[in-house]
Image (spheres, rainbow, N blue to C red):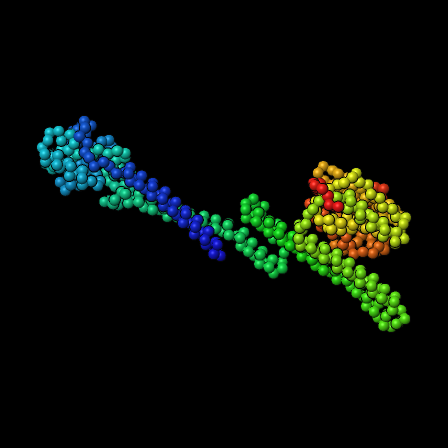
Amino acid sequence: MGRLFWKFFLSILLAQVAATIGIGGAFWLRDQARQRPAPTLDSGPPAAIALDAAAATLRHGGLPALRQMIGEVRRPQIYVLDEQQRDLLGRSVRPDLLAQAERILASGDAEGEAAARRLRAPDGAQYLAFVSRTYGRPEGARGRRPDGPGPGLMPGMDPGFGRRIGQIAGIVAAVLASLLFAALLAWYFSRPIRALRSAFEAAAAGDLAPRFAAGPKGSDELSDLGRDFDRMSGQLRALMDGQRRLLHDVSHELRSPLARLQAAVGLAHQQPDKVANSLERIERESVRMDKLVGELLTLSRLEASPKVARREPVDLTELVDAIVGDARFEVTQAGKARTGIVVDAPGPLPVEGDPDLLWSAIENVVRNAIKHGAQGGLVEVVLRAGSGTVQVEVLDRGPGIAPGDLPAIFEPFFRAGASRTGVDGHGLGLAIAQRVVHAHGGTIAAANRDEGGLRVTITLPFGHGKAAA
Protein backbone atom coordinates (compact mmCIF):
# COMPACT_ATOMS: atom_id res chain seq x y z
CA MET A 1 0.00 0.00 0.00
CA GLY A 2 1.32 3.43 -0.91
CA ARG A 3 1.24 6.68 0.96
CA LEU A 4 -1.84 7.84 -0.92
CA PHE A 5 -3.78 4.84 0.40
CA TRP A 6 -2.94 5.72 3.99
CA LYS A 7 -3.85 9.37 3.45
CA PHE A 8 -7.25 8.36 2.10
CA PHE A 9 -7.66 5.75 4.82
CA LEU A 10 -6.80 8.02 7.77
CA SER A 11 -8.83 10.95 6.45
CA ILE A 12 -11.96 8.87 5.93
CA LEU A 13 -11.46 7.02 9.22
CA LEU A 14 -11.04 10.20 11.27
CA ALA A 15 -14.10 11.75 9.66
CA GLN A 16 -16.23 8.70 10.39
CA VAL A 17 -14.91 8.27 13.95
CA ALA A 18 -15.58 11.94 14.69
CA ALA A 19 -19.09 11.62 13.31
CA THR A 20 -19.69 8.43 15.30
CA ILE A 21 -18.48 9.95 18.57
CA GLY A 22 -20.44 13.13 17.97
CA ILE A 23 -23.68 11.31 17.23
CA GLY A 24 -23.14 8.82 20.07
CA GLY A 25 -22.38 11.65 22.49
CA ALA A 26 -25.52 13.51 21.45
CA PHE A 27 -27.68 10.45 22.05
CA TRP A 28 -25.95 9.80 25.38
CA LEU A 29 -26.58 13.34 26.60
CA ARG A 30 -30.21 13.14 25.52
CA ASP A 31 -30.58 9.83 27.32
CA GLN A 32 -29.01 11.27 30.45
CA ALA A 33 -31.36 14.23 30.32
CA ARG A 34 -34.33 11.92 30.06
CA GLN A 35 -33.10 9.66 32.85
CA ARG A 36 -32.36 12.42 35.35
CA PRO A 37 -35.38 12.81 37.78
CA ALA A 38 -36.26 16.17 39.21
CA PRO A 39 -34.86 16.55 42.77
CA THR A 40 -38.21 17.51 44.30
CA LEU A 41 -40.91 15.79 46.32
CA ASP A 42 -44.47 15.59 45.16
CA SER A 43 -46.94 17.11 47.63
CA GLY A 44 -50.03 17.03 45.49
CA PRO A 45 -53.24 15.07 46.13
CA PRO A 46 -52.03 11.98 44.19
CA ALA A 47 -48.96 11.84 46.41
CA ALA A 48 -51.07 12.09 49.59
CA ILE A 49 -53.37 9.32 48.34
CA ALA A 50 -50.37 7.14 47.49
CA LEU A 51 -48.89 7.63 51.00
CA ASP A 52 -52.24 6.85 52.61
CA ALA A 53 -52.45 3.68 50.56
CA ALA A 54 -48.90 2.71 51.53
CA ALA A 55 -49.67 3.26 55.24
CA ALA A 56 -52.85 1.17 55.02
CA THR A 57 -51.08 -1.59 53.11
CA LEU A 58 -48.28 -1.75 55.70
CA ARG A 59 -50.71 -1.74 58.60
CA HIS A 60 -53.00 -4.46 57.26
CA GLY A 61 -50.75 -6.49 54.93
CA GLY A 62 -47.34 -6.09 56.41
CA LEU A 63 -44.02 -5.48 54.77
CA PRO A 64 -44.39 -8.02 51.91
CA ALA A 65 -47.68 -6.43 50.83
CA LEU A 66 -46.13 -2.95 50.96
CA ARG A 67 -43.15 -4.07 48.90
CA GLN A 68 -45.47 -5.57 46.29
CA MET A 69 -47.67 -2.49 46.27
CA ILE A 70 -44.86 0.07 45.70
CA GLY A 71 -43.32 -2.24 43.06
CA GLU A 72 -46.55 -2.26 41.07
CA VAL A 73 -47.22 1.48 41.30
CA ARG A 74 -45.38 3.46 38.59
CA ARG A 75 -47.19 6.78 38.94
CA PRO A 76 -46.57 8.34 41.37
CA GLN A 77 -43.18 6.89 42.32
CA ILE A 78 -43.18 5.90 46.02
CA TYR A 79 -40.00 5.38 48.04
CA VAL A 80 -40.13 3.53 51.37
CA LEU A 81 -36.88 3.42 53.38
CA ASP A 82 -36.15 1.31 56.45
CA GLU A 83 -34.28 2.53 59.48
CA GLN A 84 -30.92 2.02 57.70
CA GLN A 85 -32.22 4.28 54.90
CA ARG A 86 -32.38 1.44 52.38
CA ASP A 87 -35.18 1.33 49.87
CA LEU A 88 -37.46 -1.72 50.16
CA LEU A 89 -36.95 -2.44 46.43
CA GLY A 90 -33.17 -1.95 46.53
CA ARG A 91 -33.30 1.19 44.43
CA SER A 92 -30.79 3.97 44.75
CA VAL A 93 -32.19 7.07 46.42
CA ARG A 94 -31.00 10.53 45.59
CA PRO A 95 -29.48 12.19 48.67
CA ASP A 96 -31.19 15.49 47.92
CA LEU A 97 -34.63 13.80 47.97
CA LEU A 98 -33.85 12.11 51.30
CA ALA A 99 -32.63 15.37 52.79
CA GLN A 100 -35.74 17.18 51.60
CA ALA A 101 -38.02 14.53 53.13
CA GLU A 102 -36.21 14.73 56.48
CA ARG A 103 -36.48 18.54 56.50
CA ILE A 104 -40.24 18.31 55.94
CA LEU A 105 -40.64 15.81 58.77
CA ALA A 106 -38.43 17.87 61.08
CA SER A 107 -40.45 21.04 60.45
CA GLY A 108 -43.65 19.38 61.68
CA ASP A 109 -45.64 21.04 58.92
CA ALA A 110 -48.99 19.32 58.57
CA GLU A 111 -49.08 20.02 54.85
CA GLY A 112 -45.73 18.26 54.50
CA GLU A 113 -47.40 14.94 55.27
CA ALA A 114 -48.68 15.02 51.70
CA ALA A 115 -45.06 14.65 50.50
CA ALA A 116 -43.36 12.59 53.25
CA ARG A 117 -44.40 10.77 56.41
CA ARG A 118 -43.36 8.09 58.88
CA LEU A 119 -45.00 4.66 58.58
CA ARG A 120 -45.21 2.17 61.44
CA ALA A 121 -45.39 -1.58 60.84
CA PRO A 122 -47.37 -3.98 63.08
CA ASP A 123 -44.07 -5.16 64.60
CA GLY A 124 -43.19 -1.59 65.61
CA ALA A 125 -40.58 -0.92 62.88
CA GLN A 126 -40.66 2.55 61.40
CA TYR A 127 -40.22 3.45 57.75
CA LEU A 128 -39.76 6.73 55.89
CA ALA A 129 -42.07 7.12 52.91
CA PHE A 130 -42.15 9.92 50.36
CA VAL A 131 -43.25 10.49 46.76
CA SER A 132 -40.83 11.80 44.10
CA ARG A 133 -41.98 14.11 41.35
CA THR A 134 -40.34 12.60 38.19
CA TYR A 135 -40.93 12.99 34.47
CA GLY A 136 -40.47 10.09 32.09
CA ARG A 137 -39.79 6.56 33.11
CA PRO A 138 -39.38 6.00 36.87
CA GLU A 139 -35.80 5.78 38.03
CA GLY A 140 -34.64 2.22 38.46
CA ALA A 141 -37.72 0.79 36.74
CA ARG A 142 -35.97 -0.07 33.43
CA GLY A 143 -35.52 -3.85 33.27
CA ARG A 144 -36.22 -4.24 36.99
CA ARG A 145 -38.62 -6.48 38.73
CA PRO A 146 -40.53 -5.08 41.73
CA ASP A 147 -38.77 -7.39 44.11
CA GLY A 148 -35.16 -7.33 42.87
CA PRO A 149 -32.58 -6.13 40.44
CA GLY A 150 -33.01 -6.27 36.69
CA PRO A 151 -32.40 -9.45 34.72
CA GLY A 152 -28.77 -10.29 34.20
CA LEU A 153 -27.63 -8.01 37.04
CA MET A 154 -26.22 -9.09 40.34
CA PRO A 155 -28.03 -7.85 43.44
CA GLY A 156 -26.76 -4.42 44.42
CA MET A 157 -25.29 -3.77 40.97
CA ASP A 158 -25.96 -0.32 39.48
CA PRO A 159 -28.70 -0.73 36.86
CA GLY A 160 -27.07 2.00 34.75
CA PHE A 161 -23.99 -0.18 34.33
CA GLY A 162 -25.64 -2.32 31.65
CA ARG A 163 -26.80 0.78 29.82
CA ARG A 164 -23.29 2.22 29.77
CA ILE A 165 -21.90 -1.11 28.56
CA GLY A 166 -24.40 -1.06 25.68
CA GLN A 167 -23.45 2.49 24.74
CA ILE A 168 -19.74 1.68 24.76
CA ALA A 169 -20.34 -1.45 22.70
CA GLY A 170 -22.30 0.59 20.15
CA ILE A 171 -19.49 3.12 19.81
CA VAL A 172 -16.90 0.36 19.46
CA ALA A 173 -19.00 -1.35 16.76
CA ALA A 174 -19.37 1.97 14.92
CA VAL A 175 -15.61 2.55 15.05
CA LEU A 176 -14.93 -0.95 13.68
CA ALA A 177 -17.45 -0.38 10.88
CA SER A 178 -15.78 2.95 10.13
CA LEU A 179 -12.43 1.19 9.99
CA LEU A 180 -13.78 -1.32 7.47
CA PHE A 181 -15.47 1.24 5.25
CA ALA A 182 -12.43 3.55 5.38
CA ALA A 183 -10.21 0.70 4.20
CA LEU A 184 -12.61 -0.14 1.37
CA LEU A 185 -12.94 3.47 0.22
CA ALA A 186 -9.19 4.07 0.41
CA TRP A 187 -8.55 0.93 -1.64
CA TYR A 188 -11.21 1.96 -4.18
CA PHE A 189 -9.66 5.42 -4.68
CA SER A 190 -6.00 4.40 -4.65
CA ARG A 191 -6.31 1.34 -6.94
CA PRO A 192 -6.80 3.24 -10.24
CA ILE A 193 -4.13 5.74 -9.24
CA ARG A 194 -1.67 2.91 -8.67
CA ALA A 195 -2.65 1.50 -12.06
CA LEU A 196 -2.01 4.90 -13.65
CA ARG A 197 1.39 5.08 -12.00
CA SER A 198 2.24 1.64 -13.36
CA ALA A 199 1.07 2.73 -16.81
CA PHE A 200 3.25 5.86 -16.69
CA GLU A 201 6.26 3.77 -15.69
CA ALA A 202 5.60 1.40 -18.59
CA ALA A 203 5.20 4.33 -20.99
CA ALA A 204 8.49 5.80 -19.79
CA ALA A 205 10.10 2.44 -20.63
CA GLY A 206 8.62 2.58 -24.15
CA ASP A 207 5.53 0.38 -23.70
CA LEU A 208 2.57 2.42 -25.03
CA ALA A 209 0.05 -0.41 -25.21
CA PRO A 210 -3.49 0.45 -24.01
CA ARG A 211 -4.08 -0.63 -20.41
CA PHE A 212 -7.53 0.63 -19.41
CA ALA A 213 -9.66 -0.27 -22.43
CA ALA A 214 -10.48 -3.72 -21.03
CA GLY A 215 -11.21 -2.40 -17.53
CA PRO A 216 -14.63 -1.73 -15.99
CA LYS A 217 -16.71 0.79 -17.89
CA GLY A 218 -17.05 3.27 -15.04
CA SER A 219 -18.33 6.80 -15.36
CA ASP A 220 -16.28 8.46 -12.64
CA GLU A 221 -13.36 10.84 -13.08
CA LEU A 222 -10.72 8.16 -12.41
CA SER A 223 -12.12 5.91 -15.16
CA ASP A 224 -12.19 8.87 -17.54
CA LEU A 225 -8.57 9.59 -16.63
CA GLY A 226 -7.60 6.02 -17.52
CA ARG A 227 -9.34 6.26 -20.89
CA ASP A 228 -7.65 9.62 -21.52
CA PHE A 229 -4.30 7.99 -20.80
CA ASP A 230 -5.05 5.24 -23.33
CA ARG A 231 -6.00 7.84 -25.91
CA MET A 232 -2.83 9.82 -25.20
CA SER A 233 -0.63 6.72 -25.41
CA GLY A 234 -2.35 5.76 -28.67
CA GLN A 235 -1.60 9.15 -30.18
CA LEU A 236 2.00 8.96 -28.99
CA ARG A 237 2.32 5.47 -30.43
CA ALA A 238 0.93 6.64 -33.77
CA LEU A 239 3.28 9.63 -33.76
CA MET A 240 6.31 7.50 -32.97
CA ASP A 241 5.33 4.95 -35.62
CA GLY A 242 4.91 7.77 -38.11
CA GLN A 243 8.33 9.18 -37.24
CA ARG A 244 9.95 5.77 -37.63
CA ARG A 245 8.19 5.25 -40.94
CA LEU A 246 9.17 8.74 -42.08
CA LEU A 247 12.80 8.15 -41.13
CA HIS A 248 12.76 4.86 -43.01
CA ASP A 249 11.20 6.44 -46.09
CA VAL A 250 13.60 9.39 -46.04
CA SER A 251 16.61 7.09 -45.84
CA HIS A 252 15.18 5.01 -48.67
CA GLU A 253 14.48 8.05 -50.85
CA LEU A 254 17.95 9.49 -50.27
CA ARG A 255 19.71 6.20 -50.90
CA SER A 256 18.63 6.00 -54.55
CA PRO A 257 19.94 9.43 -55.70
CA LEU A 258 23.07 8.96 -53.64
CA ALA A 259 23.68 5.62 -55.34
CA ARG A 260 23.20 7.24 -58.75
CA LEU A 261 25.56 10.07 -57.78
CA GLN A 262 28.21 7.54 -56.76
CA ALA A 263 27.72 5.66 -60.02
CA ALA A 264 28.07 8.86 -62.04
CA VAL A 265 31.25 9.83 -60.18
CA GLY A 266 32.67 6.34 -60.70
CA LEU A 267 31.81 6.48 -64.42
CA ALA A 268 33.56 9.85 -64.72
CA HIS A 269 36.70 8.36 -63.22
CA GLN A 270 36.62 5.31 -65.46
CA GLN A 271 35.68 7.13 -68.69
CA PRO A 272 37.12 10.64 -68.72
CA ASP A 273 35.81 11.18 -72.24
CA LYS A 274 32.21 10.96 -70.86
CA VAL A 275 32.64 13.48 -68.04
CA ALA A 276 29.98 15.77 -69.56
CA ASN A 277 27.33 13.04 -69.36
CA SER A 278 28.38 12.20 -65.81
CA LEU A 279 28.22 15.85 -64.76
CA GLU A 280 24.76 16.16 -66.27
CA ARG A 281 23.56 13.15 -64.29
CA ILE A 282 25.24 14.47 -61.13
CA GLU A 283 23.50 17.81 -61.60
CA ARG A 284 20.12 16.12 -62.15
CA GLU A 285 20.47 13.98 -59.05
CA SER A 286 21.64 16.98 -57.00
CA VAL A 287 18.56 18.94 -58.07
CA ARG A 288 16.37 15.97 -57.16
CA MET A 289 17.98 15.67 -53.73
CA ASP A 290 17.70 19.42 -53.15
CA LYS A 291 14.00 19.27 -54.00
CA LEU A 292 13.50 16.30 -51.68
CA VAL A 293 15.26 18.04 -48.79
CA GLY A 294 13.25 21.21 -49.41
CA GLU A 295 9.98 19.28 -49.33
CA LEU A 296 11.05 17.48 -46.17
CA LEU A 297 11.89 20.78 -44.49
CA THR A 298 8.52 22.23 -45.49
CA LEU A 299 6.68 19.15 -44.20
CA SER A 300 8.67 19.23 -40.95
CA ARG A 301 7.85 22.90 -40.34
CA LEU A 302 4.17 22.32 -40.96
CA GLU A 303 4.04 19.36 -38.56
CA ALA A 304 6.05 21.18 -35.87
CA SER A 305 3.98 24.37 -36.09
CA PRO A 306 0.53 23.66 -37.57
CA LYS A 307 -0.55 27.32 -37.22
CA VAL A 308 0.08 29.89 -39.94
CA ALA A 309 2.25 32.75 -38.64
CA ARG A 310 1.71 34.98 -41.68
CA ARG A 311 -1.79 35.90 -42.77
CA GLU A 312 -2.76 38.40 -45.43
CA PRO A 313 -5.51 38.76 -48.05
CA VAL A 314 -4.92 36.60 -51.11
CA ASP A 315 -6.93 36.51 -54.34
CA LEU A 316 -7.22 32.79 -54.94
CA THR A 317 -8.24 33.24 -58.59
CA GLU A 318 -5.13 35.27 -59.34
CA LEU A 319 -2.97 32.75 -57.47
CA VAL A 320 -4.41 29.80 -59.43
CA ASP A 321 -3.97 31.63 -62.75
CA ALA A 322 -0.26 32.18 -62.01
CA ILE A 323 0.24 28.53 -61.01
CA VAL A 324 -1.53 27.26 -64.14
CA GLY A 325 0.49 29.64 -66.31
CA ASP A 326 3.75 28.20 -64.98
CA ALA A 327 2.44 24.66 -65.42
CA ARG A 328 1.47 25.31 -69.03
CA PHE A 329 4.94 26.62 -69.76
CA GLU A 330 6.60 23.57 -68.22
CA VAL A 331 4.26 21.22 -70.12
CA THR A 332 5.18 22.91 -73.36
CA GLN A 333 8.89 22.73 -72.60
CA ALA A 334 8.56 19.02 -71.73
CA GLY A 335 6.92 18.23 -75.05
CA LYS A 336 3.46 17.56 -73.59
CA ALA A 337 1.68 20.27 -75.55
CA ARG A 338 -1.33 18.02 -76.04
CA THR A 339 -2.01 18.07 -72.29
CA GLY A 340 -4.44 20.95 -71.74
CA ILE A 341 -4.94 22.90 -68.51
CA VAL A 342 -8.04 25.09 -68.13
CA VAL A 343 -9.23 27.31 -65.31
CA ASP A 344 -12.88 27.99 -64.52
CA ALA A 345 -13.31 30.82 -61.99
CA PRO A 346 -16.28 33.16 -61.41
CA GLY A 347 -14.05 36.12 -60.52
CA PRO A 348 -11.88 37.30 -57.62
CA LEU A 349 -12.17 34.99 -54.60
CA PRO A 350 -10.42 36.41 -51.51
CA VAL A 351 -9.00 34.21 -48.76
CA GLU A 352 -6.64 34.96 -45.87
CA GLY A 353 -3.39 33.11 -45.35
CA ASP A 354 0.25 32.74 -46.29
CA PRO A 355 0.58 33.26 -50.08
CA ASP A 356 3.73 31.14 -50.35
CA LEU A 357 2.20 28.17 -48.49
CA LEU A 358 -1.05 28.39 -50.46
CA TRP A 359 0.94 28.55 -53.69
CA SER A 360 2.90 25.42 -52.67
CA ALA A 361 -0.27 23.49 -51.76
CA ILE A 362 -2.24 24.24 -54.94
CA GLU A 363 0.85 23.86 -57.15
CA ASN A 364 1.53 20.40 -55.71
CA VAL A 365 -2.04 19.30 -56.45
CA VAL A 366 -1.95 20.70 -60.01
CA ARG A 367 1.46 19.16 -60.76
CA ASN A 368 0.24 15.85 -59.34
CA ALA A 369 -2.73 15.95 -61.74
CA ILE A 370 -0.44 16.71 -64.69
CA LYS A 371 1.95 13.87 -63.77
CA HIS A 372 -0.70 11.24 -63.23
CA GLY A 373 -3.19 12.40 -65.88
CA ALA A 374 -3.53 10.59 -69.16
CA GLN A 375 -1.15 11.66 -71.93
CA GLY A 376 -2.96 14.32 -73.90
CA GLY A 377 -5.76 14.48 -71.34
CA LEU A 378 -7.36 17.60 -69.93
CA VAL A 379 -6.63 18.97 -66.45
CA GLU A 380 -9.37 21.26 -65.11
CA VAL A 381 -9.06 23.67 -62.20
CA VAL A 382 -12.50 24.86 -61.05
CA LEU A 383 -13.02 27.56 -58.43
CA ARG A 384 -16.33 28.07 -56.66
CA ALA A 385 -17.63 30.30 -53.87
CA GLY A 386 -19.69 28.44 -51.27
CA SER A 387 -21.42 29.48 -48.06
CA GLY A 388 -18.52 31.20 -46.31
CA THR A 389 -15.99 29.01 -48.14
CA VAL A 390 -14.01 28.89 -51.36
CA GLN A 391 -13.53 25.59 -53.20
CA VAL A 392 -10.74 24.66 -55.59
CA GLU A 393 -11.29 21.46 -57.57
CA VAL A 394 -8.48 19.91 -59.59
CA LEU A 395 -9.69 17.21 -62.01
CA ASP A 396 -7.64 14.97 -64.27
CA ARG A 397 -8.41 12.10 -66.64
CA GLY A 398 -5.79 9.66 -65.44
CA PRO A 399 -6.26 6.11 -64.15
CA GLY A 400 -7.44 7.31 -60.75
CA ILE A 401 -6.62 5.71 -57.42
CA ALA A 402 -7.54 2.27 -56.13
CA PRO A 403 -10.38 2.67 -53.58
CA GLY A 404 -8.26 1.01 -50.89
CA ASP A 405 -5.46 3.55 -51.43
CA LEU A 406 -7.60 6.72 -51.30
CA PRO A 407 -7.30 7.22 -47.49
CA ALA A 408 -3.48 7.00 -47.72
CA ILE A 409 -2.68 9.36 -50.59
CA PHE A 410 -2.05 12.26 -48.20
CA GLU A 411 0.53 10.29 -46.22
CA PRO A 412 4.21 11.19 -46.77
CA PHE A 413 6.05 9.09 -49.41
CA PHE A 414 2.86 7.39 -50.59
CA ARG A 415 2.91 6.86 -54.37
CA ALA A 416 -0.07 4.99 -55.72
CA GLY A 417 0.81 3.02 -58.85
CA ALA A 418 4.24 4.63 -59.23
CA SER A 419 5.73 1.42 -60.49
CA ARG A 420 2.86 0.95 -62.92
CA THR A 421 2.87 4.43 -64.43
CA GLY A 422 6.59 5.12 -64.21
CA VAL A 423 5.93 8.60 -62.80
CA ASP A 424 8.82 10.15 -60.92
CA GLY A 425 8.28 11.79 -57.53
CA HIS A 426 8.75 11.42 -53.81
CA GLY A 427 5.14 11.25 -52.66
CA LEU A 428 5.37 14.44 -50.54
CA GLY A 429 3.31 16.87 -52.61
CA LEU A 430 -0.16 15.87 -51.41
CA ALA A 431 1.11 15.46 -47.83
CA ILE A 432 2.40 19.06 -47.87
CA ALA A 433 -0.86 20.25 -49.46
CA GLN A 434 -2.90 18.63 -46.71
CA ARG A 435 -0.81 20.21 -43.91
CA VAL A 436 -1.04 23.65 -45.55
CA VAL A 437 -4.81 23.45 -46.02
CA HIS A 438 -5.38 22.26 -42.44
CA ALA A 439 -3.14 25.06 -41.14
CA HIS A 440 -5.44 27.54 -42.92
CA GLY A 441 -8.56 26.00 -41.32
CA GLY A 442 -9.67 24.21 -44.48
CA THR A 443 -10.14 20.66 -45.72
CA ILE A 444 -8.81 18.61 -48.62
CA ALA A 445 -10.29 15.40 -50.04
CA ALA A 446 -9.77 13.13 -53.01
CA ALA A 447 -12.24 10.93 -54.90
CA ASN A 448 -12.34 9.03 -58.17
CA ARG A 449 -14.42 10.51 -60.98
CA ASP A 450 -17.19 8.46 -62.57
CA GLU A 451 -15.88 9.24 -66.05
CA GLY A 452 -12.31 8.34 -65.05
CA GLY A 453 -9.60 10.27 -63.29
CA LEU A 454 -9.20 11.85 -59.88
CA ARG A 455 -10.89 14.84 -58.25
CA VAL A 456 -9.02 16.68 -55.48
CA THR A 457 -11.15 19.27 -53.63
CA ILE A 458 -9.64 22.00 -51.47
CA THR A 459 -12.01 24.01 -49.25
CA LEU A 460 -10.79 27.20 -47.55
CA PRO A 461 -12.60 29.78 -45.40
CA PHE A 462 -13.75 32.85 -47.31
CA GLY A 463 -11.60 35.92 -46.62
CA HIS A 464 -12.48 39.61 -46.36
CA GLY A 465 -10.71 42.69 -47.54
CA LYS A 466 -8.70 43.55 -50.61
CA ALA A 467 -6.56 40.74 -51.99
CA ALA A 468 -2.88 41.19 -52.38
CA ALA A 469 -1.69 41.61 -55.96
Indicate the quadrant where residue 200 lies.
bottom right
**Residue closer to the observer: 279 or 237:** 279
Q: Is residue 422 above or below residue 66?
A: below
**Residue closer to the observer: 415 or 84:** 415
Q: Is residue 201 above or below residue 451?
A: below
Indicate the quadrant where residue 278 lies.
bottom right
**Residue closer to the observer: 235 or 168:** 235
Indicate the quadrant where residue 321 lies.
top right
Q: Residue at x 79, y 54 (%)?
A: 415
Q: Residue at x 80, y 60 (%)?
A: 288
Q: Is residue 81 above or below residue 228?
A: above
Q: Residue at x 50, y 50 (%)?
A: 189
207 to the left or right of 171: right
In the rendering, at what x and y percent does residue 175 appear?
39, 48
In the rendering, at what x and y percent does residue 45 appear?
18, 27
In the rendering, at what x and y percent does residue 171 appear?
36, 46
Q: Is residue 121 shown to the viewer in this render?
A: no
Q: Is residue 282 shown to the viewer in this render?
A: yes
269 to the left or right of 305: right
**Residue closer to the observer: 114 or 457:** 457
In the rendering, at what x and y percent does residue 303 appear?
68, 53
